[in-house]
Image (cartoon, rainbow, N blue to C red):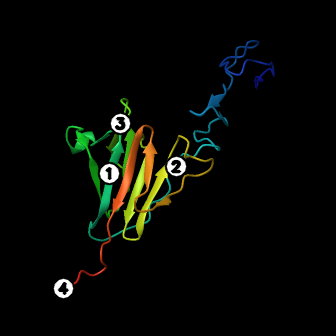
Amino acid sequence: MKCSSCYAENAPWATLCSTCGNPTLALELCPNGHLLAPGQRDCAVCPSAWPEVPPFQGPPVLRGLLWVERGDLVGSANEGSGERLYFCELRDREASIALGIDARGRARLLADDDPETVARLVVRPSGFSLCRRGGRATRPGPLAYEPLHPGSSFDLENVRLRLVTWEIPAFPEGAR
């Protein structure tokens, strides 16, 4: 790394020039080891920003369940004591369902804006979609929601979750 004052060569991690003592810009890396441009906080290679959730207004119709096939799913701290859940109800709602992994390797339901979120699930009358950050499923570029098909499963580290859905009629028979 060259000093901007005296142009002397310095080690990439040096914060002060070894020749003149002026501050230098040390190299910064993203959590995955990619080089960040000076002053930049988001990596150009790693996805960082969650995509926009399509707007929704309507009743919270129960569309299915997120079933725990392997591992543990726990509720968030603000929903109780963080107790173990065997399933999570999937209802139409404005916000996505945020999931994270805690220190013990369990999947955890999180607040929508929690920075520890590793996956978001959107439930809409038209279907389900999932967006994941990190791990093998992430490809370079911006994050995007991908459709989840009924009966499909996905892994969050050592936890496997399966989407169990049922058909909801557009207008229930006999209702007037």
Q: CA distance from mark 2 to mark 4?
A: 46 Å
Please name the residue that numbered disc 3 is placed on: 106
Q: Tell me the kind of residue under disc 1.
A: Trp
At numbered mark 1, what does the secondary structure look like: helix, strand or loop?
strand
Q: Tell me the kind of residue under disc 4.
A: Gly
Mark 3 vs mark 2: which is more N-terminal? 2
- Going 35% across and 38% down the picture, which residue do you hit? 71
Which is more foreground, mark 3 or mark 1?
Answer: 1
Mark 1 vs mark 2: which is more N-terminal? 2
The answer to which image quadrant residue 164 occupies is bottom left
Q: Are marks 2 and 4 in contact (CB under 8 Å)?
A: no
At numbered mark 4, what does the secondary structure look like: helix, strand or loop?
loop
Please name the residue that numbered disc 1 is placed on: 67
Q: Tell me the kind of residue under disc 3.
A: Arg
Q: CA distance from mark 3 to mark 2?
A: 24 Å
Please name the residue that numbered disc 2 is placed on: 49
- Going 65% across and 35% down the picture, which residue do you hit? 34
- Going 73% across and 12% down the picture, which residue do you hit? 18
Mark 3 vs mark 1: which is more N-terminal? 1
Position in image of residue 24 (x %, y %): 69, 23
Q: Are marks 3 and 1 in contact (CB under 8 Å)?
A: no
Q: Is residue 12 above or below residue 113?
A: above
Q: Between 100 and 159, which is closer to the camera in this rendering?
A: 159
Please name the residue that numbered disc 4 is placed on: 174
Q: CA distance from mark 1 to mark 2?
A: 27 Å
Q: Tell me the kind of residue under disc 2.
A: Ala
